[in-house]
Image: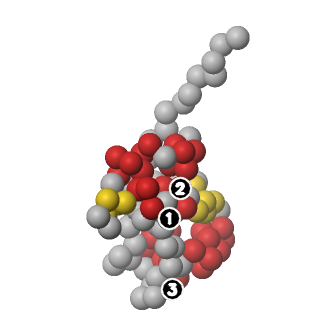
């Protein structure tokens, strides 16, 4: 039996800091993005509530873009205390964790 061949797909990154929700979605459409994977550990914004998890998912769905939250596995501040050294995230340790490996796959 042959192992299934994995297909490589490009990964794009985008930030929302100085964008309106309309400009953000327009940028996704301009690059034919069908899925947005949200890697924020805490997917909420006090200053731009339209980019909070639920509001963003709803806005994207209305435009035919699927929102997938993966911040629990790929976010920058993991819950696992084994990922920290002297209060700082050790990303080498994070990469070794099963939750991170599952998130990557």
Dividing the picture into quadrants, the one containing residue 6 is top right
Judge by depth and name the residue closer to the eye, 34 or 7: 7
Question: Going by the image, does 56 lie left or right of 39?
Answer: right
Residue 83, image x, y percentages: 41, 56
Residue 19, image x, y percentages: 38, 77
Mark whose residue sits in front, 3 or 2: 2
* Residue at the top extreme, as displayed: 1
Q: Residues within 10 Å of mark 2 (few under 14, many from 20)?
A: many
- Disc 3 on helix, strand or loop? helix
- Disc 2 on helix, strand or loop? helix
Residue 28, image x, y percentages: 48, 61
Determine the CA span between mark 1 and mark 2: 9 Å
Mark whose residue sits in front, 1 or 2: 1
Determine the CA span between mark 3 and mark 1: 24 Å
Residue at mark 3: 49
- Image vertical order of residue 46 relative to residue 86, above or below: below
- Image vertical order of residue 26 relative to residue 100, above or below: below
Q: Residue at x 35, y 76 (%)?
A: 17
State whether residue 37 appears in this view: no
């Amino acid at each position: 039996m042959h192992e299934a061949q994995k297909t490589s797909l490009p990964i794009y990154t985008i930030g929302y800091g100085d964008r309106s929700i309309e400009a953000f979605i327009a940028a996704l459409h301009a690059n034919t993005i069908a899925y947005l994977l949200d890697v924020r550990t805490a997917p909420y914004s006090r200053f731009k509530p339209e980019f909070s998890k639920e509001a963003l998912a709803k806005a994207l769905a209305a435009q035919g873009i699927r929102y997938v939250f993966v911040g629990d596995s790929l976010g920058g501040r993991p819950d696992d205390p084994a990922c920290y050294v002297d209060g700082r995230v050790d990303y080498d340790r994070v990469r070794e964790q099963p939750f991170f490996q599952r998130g990557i796959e």
